[in-house]
Amino acid sequence: MSEALVEIKGLEKSFDAVRALRGVDMEIAPGQVTALLGDNGAGKSTLVRCLTGVHPADAGEIRFRGEPIKLGSPDDARRLGIETVYQTLGLIEDLQVWQNLYLNRELTTGFGPIRVLDKKAMISSSREILSKLDVDVPNVRSSVRRMSGGQRQSIAIARAANWGRTLVIMDEPTAALGVRETAAVESLIGRLREDGVTVLLISHDMAQVKRVADVAYVLRGGRAAARRAVAGTSGDELVGLITGALEGDARA
Ligand SMILES: Nc1ncnc2c1ncn2[C@@H]1O[C@H](COP(=O)(O)OP(=O)(O)O)[C@@H](O)[C@H]1O
Ligand SMILES: [Mg+2]
C-alpha cells in the first residue's frame, strides 16, 4: 500500500509520564475520507497535532507521498497542503467572511515594493470559493459575527479546503451543530471528496461515520487498534472497537 498519501509508522509521543501515542501505525489513502475514532484520551488530538507540526513526535516516522518528512511547525504542514479545522475554528468575529477566508494570506497588487491589498480580487474569489462548494453564505461582506454555527463551520472548512489542497483534517466538525447544519457540513465533506481532497475526520458520531467515511481507524490507549472499511462495518462494531469490547486488528 505504498500509494498512501500519509503513512504513519510507530509514532510515539509522551507528555512527561503520560504516553499519549504508543506506536501508532496508520495510512491515509488519497481522495478518501478517513475517520479517526477513539474514546476520550485515546490520542486523537495528539496524533493530529503531530501530523500538523504542532507537536514534534518523540519517535516514529511520517511519510508524505512516500517521502519521510519532518514537521517542525504548522508552517511545514501548510507548505505540504495540510490544513486543520480545529473545534475553535479560528475565525475572527469582527472580520468579514472574505477577510477570514484570506486571513494571513492576503492577495496584493502593484509593482515592486509598492504593494496594496487586492480587496476586489479577494472578494470575488471568496464568492467563487464558497459557491463552488455550495456553501450557503449570502454575503461575503457580512461579518462572521452574524453567521450561524453551521455557516461558521462551513466557512472554516472552505478556508481549509481552499489552502489545504492535499489533506484537510477536521476535529469533530459537527459537535456543536443542529441536524440541518450537520447535514450541510456532511454534504460539504462529500463535495471535498468529489473534488479530490483527502479528509481526516475525527468524529464521535457513528451514524455520521457511516454516512461520510470510507475507512475508519480506531485509536485505543495510544495505538491504532483497528482499521475497518466503513461499508462492511456496523456502527455497533465500531463502538465495540472503541470501547475495547471487540478486539481489532489494525491490518484487517
Ligand atoms: N499538552 C498535553 N499535556 C499533557 N498531557 C496531554 C497533553 N495533550 C494530551 N495529553 C494527554 O494525552 C492523552 C491523549 O490525549 P488526546 O490526544 O487529547 O486524546 P483524545 O483527543 O483522543 O481525547 C490523554 O491522557 C491526555 O490527558
Ligand atoms: Mg481530542
Image (cartoon, grey):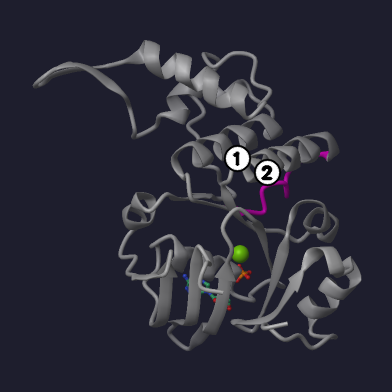
User: Where does the magenta region start and end?
Assistant: 170-178
Quadrant of image for the N terminus: bottom right
Residue drawn at (66%, 27%) of the image: 135
Under tag 2, what secondary structure? helix
Residue ID at (59%, 82%)? 222
Query: Which of labels 1 and 2 is toward the front?
Result: 1
| Cα distance between the residues tagged 1 and 2 | 10 Å
* Dominant SS in magenta: loop
Residue visible at 50% across and 41% down?
A: 160
Left or right of 141 in this view: 99: left
Q: Mark 1 belongs to which amino acid?
A: Asp
Mark 1 neighbour class, 10 Å CA radius: few under 14, some 14 to 19, many 20 or more: few
| Residue 99, picture quadrant | top left
Where 92 sits versus 64, above or below? above
- The reply to whether discs 1 and 2 touch (Cβ–Cβ < 8 Å) is no
Residue behind mark 2: 189
Q: Quadrant of ligand 1?
A: bottom right
Which quadrant of the figure contains the C terminus?
bottom right
Residue nearer the viewer, 91 or 208: 208
Label 1, on which residue?
195
In the image: residue 214, left or right of residue 119: right
- 239 or 131: which is nearer to us? 131
